Image: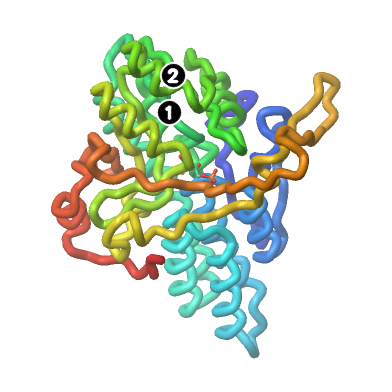
Amino acid sequence: MKVNNIDYRTVWLEGTSVFFIEQNLLPFQFNIQEAKTYSESCVAIRTMKVRGAGAIGAIAGFAMAQAALEAPESDYHSFLKNAKTEIEATRPTARNLFYAVEKVYTASLTSRAAAVFEAQQVADRDAADSRKIGEFGNELIRDGMAIETHCNAGWLAFVDYGTALSPIYLAHQQGKKIFVYADETRPRSQGARLTAWELRQAGVPHTIIPDNAGAWLMSLGKIDMMIVGADRIAANGDTANKIGTLEKAIAAKEYGVPFYVAAPTTTFDLNCPDGSHIPIEERNEDEVLYQDGFTIDGRHERVLVCSPGSTAFNPAFDVTPAKFITGIITEKGIIKADRETIASLFNGISSNSQCG
Ligand code: MRU
């Protein structure tokens, strides 16, 4: 996608370095950073400089390729095994991370060059899948619709285009008059910061709403459809996504608002029989207790926004049961969120991930 008229991907490999858009600084500063080693790429994932399922997958694949390039000849296999474990430990929920690491690790057993090639394939596939999701999802969008989204499943969360926002971009480009309600998505405010920034860059009419406003707007008939992303989808269609998604899905069902999940097939985990097996990341309480941002004169500040001395519980994701999901928009088409449909989508092929 374009930023200041220049085409960017969120993350890419050049030589032995990974370059990425530093998402913690957005929307205040647009900054490209470099990770020279696979360990530095791990830090970028852990600290959420690169975040969002597809983007995490791409940088994890590149990190695995960096490890293949760094591995000493004498100790090649054990170095790679350790690197794989380290990369997989960066964030537990996004399925794309494990998909990418497995693919690139397997390739690295053939050669270093094969690992680099495979990592690039993973990133290219992510961009292509997101584009297709846009085409299928756009078919659901009618002129005049108001669409709510949660967190950021835009192009920043993937290599390009995004998932939940990809249909919105296409509909807007085709001249459909649409309006987007972006949930702010505390505690890290990916909606208020990243989704709003993306939509503004693309000229899509939108407004940010507090996290607790969605149900009220639905009850007033102001939301025609909700589209969210996904971090992992179990074999029965239960979907892990950013914390707060579940309550939106329940409200959408109550008020008859179609609730769609947009995700590539690389986000499905057929080894997770249902959502109760999806590992849910718990992040540091400081993300809730403090907020950070930039002052008008450009200084970065971090302030305490909670009662001093209180603790906070900070689960990063929740699981929406399949029964609340109207459909899943994938790169292969829009499918029902049920076990039979998902099994036939994969033609009985199961993944290698260890769920749980
Ligand atoms: O913790 P994050 O920001 O990496 O969370 C992932 C997400 O961006 C969301 O859950 C998103 O809706 C699905 S992944 C694009």
Q: Which residue is mark 1?
A: 149
The picture places residue 192, in percent across and down from the top left corner, at 58, 26
Please, is residue 206 above or below residue 118 in the view?
above
Q: Which residue is mark 2?
A: 180
Q: On the picture, is 267 further left or further right than 117?
A: left
Closer-to-camera residue (23/171): 23
Residue at the image point whose x is 59% and y is 33% from the top: 189
Closer-to-camera residue (304/111): 304
Kind of element beneath mark 2: strand
Q: On the picture, is 159 further left or further right than 224?
A: right
Please, is residue 105 above or below residue 90 in the view?
below
Badge 1 amino acid: Thr
Please, is residue 130 above or below residue 149 in the view?
below
Please, is residue 244 above or below residue 140 in the view?
below
- Looking at the image, tell me whether mark 1 or mark 2 is earlier in sequence order: 1
Residue at the image point whose x is 64% and y is 78% from the top: 71
Residue 28, by quadrant, is top right
Q: On the picture, is 223 further left or further right than 296?
A: left
* Mark 1 in CB contact with mark 2 (< 8 angstroms): yes
Badge 2 amino acid: Val
Position of the C terminus, as image quadrant, is: bottom left
